[in-house]
Image (cartoon, rainbow, N blue to C red):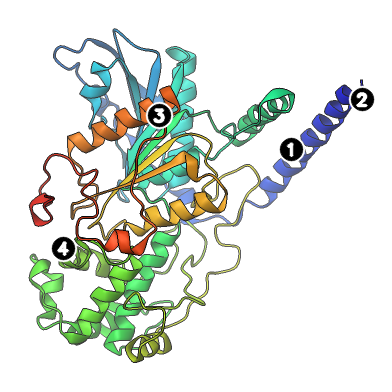
């Protein structure tokens, strides 16, 4: 009787906390931002899609809570559902949805899949999570209740995945009576948070470090200006291109205008510019195959993020970039060289605005924070040469999981390619198959040690899970 009474007391207190927390969340939503007033639309004529030859299926499309969607269920459905999360779609008003690259493979193995356009464009990860979760609930109501739900996607879609799988009811509960109570509470919390239960995840080239991506962009910009000896300004002036960007390029390149031209990879760094390449290598994951080589292919893109006001194009209410206390380095030696000391002395120090991207009880931040609070199997893959969403995103994710004692739920893998999300079909299929096997058997598959600098710097790093061919694979062949 005492045990039962204790459980009732705990439940009452917990529900009281929920109600209090929900009210607190409403009060703490923060000031309105430009994204709140933007309008988007779905062209419904673009939603229909055809059946694949030899893979009979039932297809459905439509609009769910402002987001376009596609659903496909094979005739020999095995009962499992794959949610596909797309990457950044730009800043236009039209919302679009596409089919997953492994569509045919999913269907051939009996998996159903569903994909959402999300209810908003821009870097609105919160909209991505909410729309994807809503589509799972739509599937349950209108199609069938799946046995298991997996989630996979690319780039910003990886950020969507990282946030979605940490929402309640995704929570690891103990066995026994306490576990049953825990799972009950987790389901209740899931209803408050809008989360749904996932069984496994496979983000690829994902923004698994959340807001650290924007710190990386800012560090490149302000680091370049400091190395060029050009005084930085924040907020950036209206004449930023003429007064700051162009002088920076002229100080770092032998042929600076090539950076802004049609063939930016032909731009040649001078001695001071080579320090920017070194800084970028360190900030993007450390010395590793393809890192230095990739710089010329991404330099124009990285400079295009310069002059930002820190609001991520109106997703948050103020500046989210912060470099206070960061020690900038050009090599792996923690001792500061004269060049590194000069860089740290020169670079403009900028603090994040107070209250930007504030936490909300049971609700997602405007840019959701991934905390590494894993409770399901996750295989996360990344190309080594990616300097848009850099390899360091995986290292941040792995450290977060370790800090919370959840590293057993994460497998990290590196592949050898330059491009952002440049994976071969073989790599994507192997990742998916290994995830399903892990969930089926409980046996954790192999991964790469992405946190050991010597391992990552090895000339053969990334070969273990590189399969097939990609456009840039010849630049980093494996034996």
Q: Which residue position holds label 2?
A: 2
Tell me the residue at 47%/81% (across/down): 349
Q: Which is nearer the N-term, disc 2 or disc 4?
A: 2
Distance between mark 1 and mark 4 Cα atoms: 49 Å
In whole angstroms, how far apart are the C-alphas of marks 1 and 3?
A: 34 Å
Does label 1 or label 4 sit earlier along the sequence? 1
Q: Residue drawn 49% across and 41% down? A: 408
Name the residue tied to disc 3: 438
**Between marks 1 and 2, how big is the CA–CA gap?**
24 Å
Residue furthest to the top in view is: 75
Q: Position of residue 242 (x, y in %)?
A: 24, 82
In this picture, residue 455 sits left or right of residue 8:
left
**Which is more foreground, mark 1 or mark 4?**
4
**Of the pair 116 and 337, the residue shown nearer to us:** 337
Helix, strand or loop at disc 3? Answer: helix
Which of the two labelled residues, at mark 2 and mark 3, occupies the earlier sequence position?
A: 2
* Mark carried by residue 297: 4
Q: CA distance from mark 2 to mark 4?
A: 67 Å
Q: Is residue 356 above or below residue 87?
A: below
Query: Image quadrant of residue 251?
Result: bottom left
Asked whether, in this view, residue 362 is left or right of residue 199, the answer is: right
Q: Which residue is mark 1?
A: 18
Label 2 element class: helix
> What residue do we see at 70% from left, 41% from top?
22
């Amino acid at each position: 009787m005492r045990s039962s009474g204790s459980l009732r007391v705990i439940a009452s207190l917990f529900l009281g906390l929920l109600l209090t927390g929900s009210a607190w969340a409403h009060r703490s939503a923060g000031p309105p931002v430009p994204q709140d007033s933007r309008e988007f639309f779905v062209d419904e004529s673009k939603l229909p899609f055809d059946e694949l030859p030899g893979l009979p299926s039932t297809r459905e499309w439509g609009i769910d809570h402002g987001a376009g969607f596609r659903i496909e269920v094979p005739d020999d459905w095995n009962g499992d559902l794959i949610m596909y999360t797309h990457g950044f779609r730009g800043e236009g008003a039209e919302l679009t949805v596409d089919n997953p690259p492994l569509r045919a493979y999913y269907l051939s193995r009996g998996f159903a899949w569903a994909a959402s356009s999300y209810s908003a464009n821009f870097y609105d990860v919160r909209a991505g999570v909410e729309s994807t979760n809503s589509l799972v609930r739509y599937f349950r109501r209108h199609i069938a209740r799946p046995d298991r739900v997996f989630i996979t996607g690319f780039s910003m879609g990886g950020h969507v995945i990282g946030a979605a799988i940490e929402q309640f009811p995704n929570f690891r509960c103990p066995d026994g009576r306490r576990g049953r109570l825990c799972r009950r509470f987790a389901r209740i919390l899931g209803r408050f948070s809008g989360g749904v239960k996932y069984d496994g995840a496979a983000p690829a080239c994902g923004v698994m470090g959340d807001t650290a991506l924007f710190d990386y962009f800012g560090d490149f910009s302000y680091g370049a200006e400091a190395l060029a000896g050009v005084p930085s300004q924040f907020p950036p002036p209206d004449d930023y291109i003429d007064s700051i960007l162009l002088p920076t390029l002229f100080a770092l390149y032998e042929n600076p205008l090539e950076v802004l031209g049609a063939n930016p990879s032909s731009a040649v760094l001078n001695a001071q510019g080579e320090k920017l390449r070194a800084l970028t290598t360190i900030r993007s994951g450390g010395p590793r195959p393809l890192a230095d080589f990739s710089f010329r292919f991404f330099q124009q893109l990285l400079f295009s993020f310069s002059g930002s006001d820190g609001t991520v194009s109106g997703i948050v209410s103020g500046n989210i970039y912060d470099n206070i206390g960061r020690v900038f380095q050009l090599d792996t030696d923690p001792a500061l060289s004269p060049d590194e000391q000069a860089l740290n002395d020169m670079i403009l120090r900028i603090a994040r605005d107070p209250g930007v991207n504030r936490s909300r009880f049971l609700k997602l931040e405007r840019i959701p924070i991934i905390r590494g609070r894993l409770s399901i199997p996750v295989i996360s893959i990344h190309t080594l040469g990616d300097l848009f969403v850099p390899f360091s995103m995986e290292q941040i994710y792995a450290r977060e999981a370790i800090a919370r004692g959840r590293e057993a739920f994460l497998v990290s893998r590196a592949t050898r390619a330059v491009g952002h999300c440049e994976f071969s079909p073989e790599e994507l299929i192997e990742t998916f198959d290994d995830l399903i096997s892990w969930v089926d058997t409980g046996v954790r598959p192999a991964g790469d040690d992405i946190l050991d600098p010597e391992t990552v710097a090895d000339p053969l790093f990334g070969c273990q899970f590189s399969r097939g061919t990609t456009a840039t694979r010849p630049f980093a062949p494996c034996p």
